[in-house]
Amino acid sequence: MMTKDANETKKILSHLYNDVSKELFGFGTTLLKVKIEEKIITFQAKHRRAPRSQALEGEAPHLKLEVDFHMSILFKKKLKEKLKEIGWDIEAVLRDYDSLTQIAFTNIIVK
């Protein structure tokens, strides 16, 4: 469902990404860039540190890493669902998240 206007498509994608972030973490990103090349969409995002993450970081760092891992999987699943709801045919959603910097790169491969 890419529109002919790349800027409009980027706005739609940014809103979807932030909607997923708000749904899962309670707030959106502090920085979000969207890049579209052929059939690959890349999100570069700086997330906010959740208070529960800070608490786990000091008390149970291994648990925090495990929670981050599972939340990233859930993020990919929710984002893919939202893209499908608006008519996108998605082949894969790939995501890498660095918990120290709160930076994530998410790649969407469109069929």
Image (cartoon, rainbow, N blue to C red):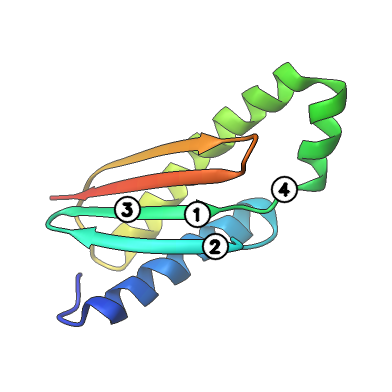
Callout 3 crowding tier (Cα within 10 Å): few <14, some 14–19, many ≥20: some
Which kind of residue does numbered mark 3 sit on?
Answer: Thr
Task: Please tell me which residue is depicted at 33% across the width and 72% down the height of the picture.
Answer: 10
**Res 42 label:** 3
Residue 104 at x, y = what percent? 49, 44
Q: Which of the two discs, 3 and 4, labels the residue nearer the N terminus?
A: 3
Q: Does residue 41 appear to the left or right of 39 in the view shown?
A: right
Q: Earlier in the sequence, mark 1 or mark 2?
A: 2
- x and y percent of residue 30 in the render? 61, 63
The amino acid at mark 2 is Leu
**Amino acid type for the residue under numbered disc 1:** Ala
Q: Nearer the viewer, residue 62 or 76?
A: 62
Q: Which residue is denoted by mark 4 in the rendering?
A: 49
> Disc 3 and disc 4: Cα gap in Å?
22 Å
Query: Mark 1 sits on what residue?
Result: 45
Q: Which residue is mark 2?
A: 31
